[in-house]
Amino acid sequence: MTVAEWLTVQTTTDSRDKALALARGAVDARVAACAQVGGPIASVYRWQGETETAEEWQVSFKTVGARYEELEAYIKGAHDYDTPEIIATAVVRGSAEYLDWVAEETAVR
């Protein structure tokens, strides 16, 4: 597996409990090795022609590229936003031991 095959995928939601549920569900489904929840954060965005401001919690999932489609489908199915943020960023470097652990924890069994 090459380094570019590891991803950090992020989303946001409007409560800590929802963020923790998204995180736990992805880890339990093994589409992410771990997920970190941070917040609250202030989000400013345009939605349906209006500028909105909301308090949100950010979830950062650690996964492998081969599991991205499943993680995206999980987030879309479990999320209550009409259009949830789902952004994947390639991990270009990282400790070999950590990246091996991510690959092991997300391996299809």
Image (cartoon, rainbow, N blue to C red):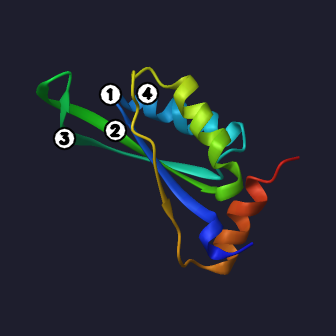
- In-image side of 100 versus 37 (left or right): right
Q: Which mark is residue 57?
A: 2
Task: Compare residues 27 and 6 and report the one nearer the observer.
Answer: 6
Q: Which mark is residue 42?
A: 3
Q: Which mark is residue 14?
A: 1
Q: SS at mark 1?
A: loop
10 Å crowding of disc 3: few (<14), some (14-19), many (20+): few
* Number of marks drawn: 4
Kind of residue at badge 2 = Trp
- Marks 2 and 4: CB-CB under 8 Å? no
The CA span between labels 4 and 1 is 9 Å
Q: Nearer the viewer, mark 4 or mark 3?
A: 3
- Marks 2 and 1: CB-CB under 8 Å? yes
Reading the image, the residue beneath label 4 is 17
The CA span between labels 2 and 3 is 9 Å
10 Å crowding of disc 2: few (<14), some (14-19), many (20+): many
The structure residue drawn at horizontal position 70% and vertical position 37%, both measured from the top left corner, is 28
Kind of residue at badge 1 = Asp
- In-image side of 55 versus 83 (left or right): left
